Image (cartoon, coloured by chain):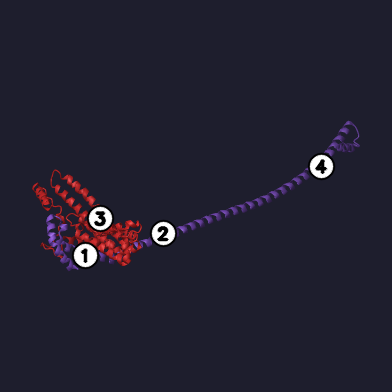
Chain colours: A purple, B red
Amino acid sequence: MATDIQEAGKAVAEVGEAAEKAGMPQLDFSTFPNQIFWLVVTLVVIYLILSRVALPRIGAILAERQGTITNDLAAAEELKAKAVEAEKAYEKALADARAEAQRIAAQTRAEIQAELNEAIARADAEIAAKAAESEKAIAEIRASALESIEAVATETAAEIVSVLGGKPDGIAKAVAERMKG
Amino acid sequence: MASDAQAVEQMAEEGGLVFHPMEQFEIKPLFGGTEIAWYTPTNATLWMGVAILAIIGLLILGTSKRSIIPSRLQSVAELAYGFIYKMVEDICGKEGVKYFPYVMTLFMFIVTANFLGLLPLAFTTTSHIAVTAVMAMLVFLSVTVLGFVLHGASFLGLFWISSAPLALRPILALIEVISYFVRPISHSIRLAGNMMAGHAVIKVFAAFAAIELLSPVPILAITAIYALEVLVAFIQAYVFTILTCVYLKDALHPNH
């Protein structure tokens, strides 16, 4: 192929010399075979470099990065789900604790109420007993007082009668009658 | 026309100005002599070699660490890969992906050569029609052969537009055939012409910069054009590659 190019180049070299004098090196056909040869060499070398080394490598890097990103996203999604789950568990624990606390409070309140009721009942009973006792004592005191009054009244009346010069007979009867009235 | 140009050049030289905008495109043997045989190492050879080294540096040394979190150089290599891969996939479809290394070869060579050509004193290999024409013919021939190998005679359906009215079809077919054969010409001249024009304009302004009074203006102009040329260097490589993909798509799916 190279010799073909060379021959073609020689054929156009004469035309090219005229063009060279016109000032356009681009139209100097005598340099064409040379440029074409080196261009083909360059393109082949670049193609080999790209297809053998560079492109597979860059493709692999990009694929690997894509994979990493996908994995990271999946991991993030998983962690997010876990976080949501943890939050749910926390809230549930919180609600349970609150319910438990309420239950305990209610129970305690009920116990205290029961104790209180019992104590009140006991106190009421004691108070009733004491009141009954007191009433009895008062009644006794009143009875004894009445007796004492009768005795004092009889005595006093007998004294008064004797001082006045009378006989103290029947005084006790009269006093007792009076006391009844 | 040639004598006109020489006359202008002579007049300019007498006035203290030296215009040699095309000198930078001359092909010279690297190791002396004037004879340029097909195998002679020339400045074109040198800069093609530099392009190969630059590509190795970017795509192989740049990615040698294979890091999941890429370094800057590796990012650029990955961007280039992704850019062309996506282009091939988008335009040619899944079937086109196996031609990706060929397209990538063309793109990497053109884009590297274009940017290397912007270095001062560098030689721009892609400014030569010989280089771009070979690549364009390579694309044209391989796409045509591929079309016939894959689809046989039905590849000619590319020229027979069945959605057009029947009376118009022969005329359209003629236009399609002509435009098909013009493809390699426009494909190659677009790239070489763009590269050559930009570099020549910079050189012309550089000659004006020799006039002391005026020098800030041409230097500013060179700066501006240089910025434009950086853009053009990439865009032309992109255009060449995307057209290659479009032609390849025609070979893969001639009936769309």
Question: Mark 1 or mark 4: which comes first in sequence?
Answer: 1
Q: CA distance from mark 1 to mark 3?
A: 20 Å
Question: Mark 2 or mark 1: which comes first in sequence?
Answer: 1
CB under 8 Å between discs 1 and 3? no
**Tag on residue A143?**
4
Residue nearest the observer in this picture, B118 or A162: B118
**Tag on residue B215?**
none
Relative vertical location of residue A94 with respect to residue A42 in this rendering, above or below: above
**Tag on residue B236?**
3
Q: CA distance from mark 4 to mark 3?
A: 139 Å
Q: Which residue is mark 2?
A: A73
Chain of the residue on which disc 2 is drawn:
A
Q: Residue B237: horizontal and vertical position, in percent?
A: 26, 57
Chain of the residue on which disc 3 is drawn:
B
Q: CA distance from mark 1 to mark 4?
A: 149 Å
Hey, which residue is sitting farthest left in the picture?
B14
Q: Nearer the viewer, mark 2 or mark 1?
A: 1
